[in-house]
Amino acid sequence: MTRLYHFALSPFCRKVRLVLAEKKIDVELVEERYWEPSTEFLRRNPAGKVPVLKIDGLMLSDSQAICEYVEETVPEPALMPKDAKSRAEVRRLCGWFDDKFHSEVTANLVYERVNKKIMRGGYPDGKAVKTGAQQIKFHLDYMAWLLDHRRWLAGDRMTLADFTAAAHLSCLDYISDVDWNRSEIVKDWYAKIKSRPAFRSILADQVPGFIQPPHYANLDF
């Protein structure tokens, strides 16, 4: 049995879930309170972070490493281009969202508003929340620029870059922190990607203490 140790509002876990679902790989989801790491969990990943995927007799960690392993072992449907130049662009954008977007937006909004409460880490830092709310505008504008030149974020086909971006935005959308009116082209892109069967379990997530906004699981917003 393939098993994913995850946290529902982790964009890195959601990224892996989307890839597994797109590849039609059945997986058992195990909610992991990674901020209270047990000895058993630290044996799975000494870094004490999620996601961790048990698959093919292996214990894999790091969302990008997991996704590329799955891509190489289950090549269809393809989420990485065949040519090196296009693969480099996909990896660049995955890095953009998992690093820059995460540090400037996700950490300042989702982690402050949700994770702190769940982890009993105190009240949200108002300055951090304000920074995240400002920074997301830049990122949405950058996405709009990309999509104005391409059908999908990295090119003419949907790739891992789209799932990576959607994983982060879906976490923010769960707490109504995305202004979808800022860009019609980004809104249309997200509507397309969240309409995919792979997105169903993401849209069904329920985080205790935080209620989904009415539009969250609505495929037509």
Image: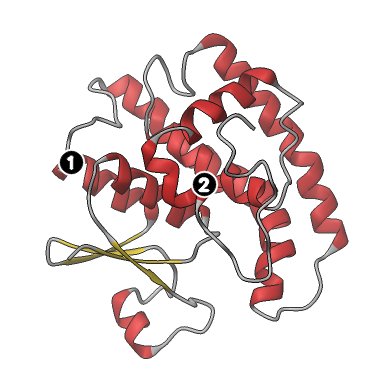
Q: Quadrant of residue 39?
A: bottom left
Q: Tag 2 or tag 1, which sits nearer the N-term?
A: 1
Q: Residue at x 29, y 48 (%)?
A: 20
In the image, residue 186 sits, relative to residue 95, either above or below, namely above
Q: Residue at x 50, y 53 (%)?
A: 204
* Disc 2 residue type (three-letter): Asp
Q: Which mark is residue 72?
A: 1
In the image, residue 79 sits, relative to residue 212, either above or below, namely above
Q: To which residue does mark 2 refer?
A: 98
Q: Position of residue 26 (x, y in %)?
A: 23, 54
Determine whether the residue tagged by mark 2 lies in a helix, strand or loop: helix
Q: Is 10 on the left-hand or right-hand side of 115?
A: left
Marks 1 & 2, CB-CB < 8 Å contact: no
Q: Position of residue 138 (x, y in %)?
A: 73, 31
Residue situated in front as seen by the camera: 42 or 175: 175
Residue situated in front as seen by the camera: 208 or 117: 208
> How far apart are the two marked residues, 1 and 2, measured between alpha carbons?
20 Å
Q: Position of residue 164 (x, y in %)?
A: 46, 41
Task: Classify 10 Å Cα crowding around label 1: few (below 14), some (14-19), many (20 and above).
Answer: few
Q: Position of residue 180 (x, y in %)?
A: 71, 31
